[in-house]
Amino acid sequence: MEDLRFYPTQSSQAAIERAVSIKAGKAELLYVYIDVEPVGFNRGFYTVDVRYFYRVTADAFVGAARPVEVSGLCVFDKRVILFGSEGTAKIFSSQTSLEGLDEQMLRQSNLPTAVVEVVDPIVLNMKLVDVCECHPCDCELSDVPPCICGCFNSELCCGAQGKRIYVTLGQFSIIRLERDSQLLMPVYDYCMPEKECACGGGEEDPCEIFRHVKFPVNEFFPPSSPTPGGDCHPQLKGCCS
């Protein structure tokens, strides 16, 4: 954001008129105005107009005296085009009022909601110029919200002055569109176990379990017949008859 016009307060403008140089101070973001409108030639896309309001401070050097702190307003406009999908449903909802009747809210449009996340900017440069050196397209400021004017100790000077200040700011911001959507999720039924599990943690008597074990008879008495599939040795006969 390069060469933003600085709109000082009336008390600060008197010091700027007598200043010979200016030193950059800090900038603070006061408010962000956002407007969303659909794009007529491209369905699903929306224009997001954003206006940033900053309070900027600086030190004005008047001769060899101590610098005087000046403050004022800077404004920056930005427009982006983002995809926000389509929605033609009419939305009705109700909210409970603590001090009144529970009335149904008016119908709302299905436009997406624009959200701007931003941090306070950094003052990169600040210069003091005469009116004759100003930009030819420098327009006067209008439509300043009352809440913004209330952030300054006196009224802002938006008319013609002898000297003006231009500020260059650096800022990081994220602009996005949000929309409520419904998700279809599968739901699975659950079943309850029909019998108790006897695996581990039981209190059965070990002696009772041993009584159900079959006695191993073959381990104590050898078999009386050859094992099926085993080797059968033929009888040996003598060589003399």
Image (cartoon, helix red, strand yellow):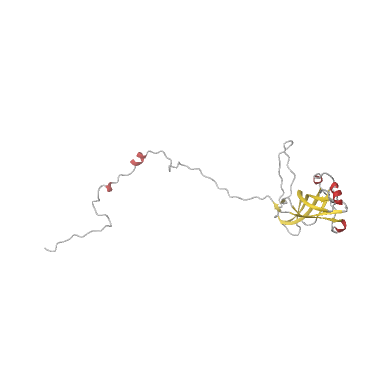
- Image label count: 0
Q: Nearer the viewer, residue 114 or 224?
A: 114
Front-most of residues 187 and 152 = 152
Residue at 28% across, 48% down: 219
**Residue 212 % position (x, y):** 34, 42
x then y, percent, for residue 29: 75, 49
* Image vertical order of residue 98 relative to residue 48, above or below: above
Quadrant for residue 200, please give it: top left
**In screen coordinates, is 87 left or right of 192?**
right
Is the residue 207 above or below the residue 36 in the image? above
Q: Considering the image in quadrants, where does the N terminus appear?
A: bottom right
Depth check: 100 or 65 in front? 65
- Residue extending furthest toward the left: 241
On the image, the x and y values in percent for residue 130 come to 86, 56
Residue projecting furthest to the bottom: 239
Viewer-closest of 237 and 33: 33
Q: Residue 71 location in percent, x, y?
A: 81, 48
In the current view of this chain or complex, which residue is farthest to the front? 64
Q: Quadrant of the C terminus?
A: bottom left
Going 34% across and 41% down the picture, which residue do you hit?
210
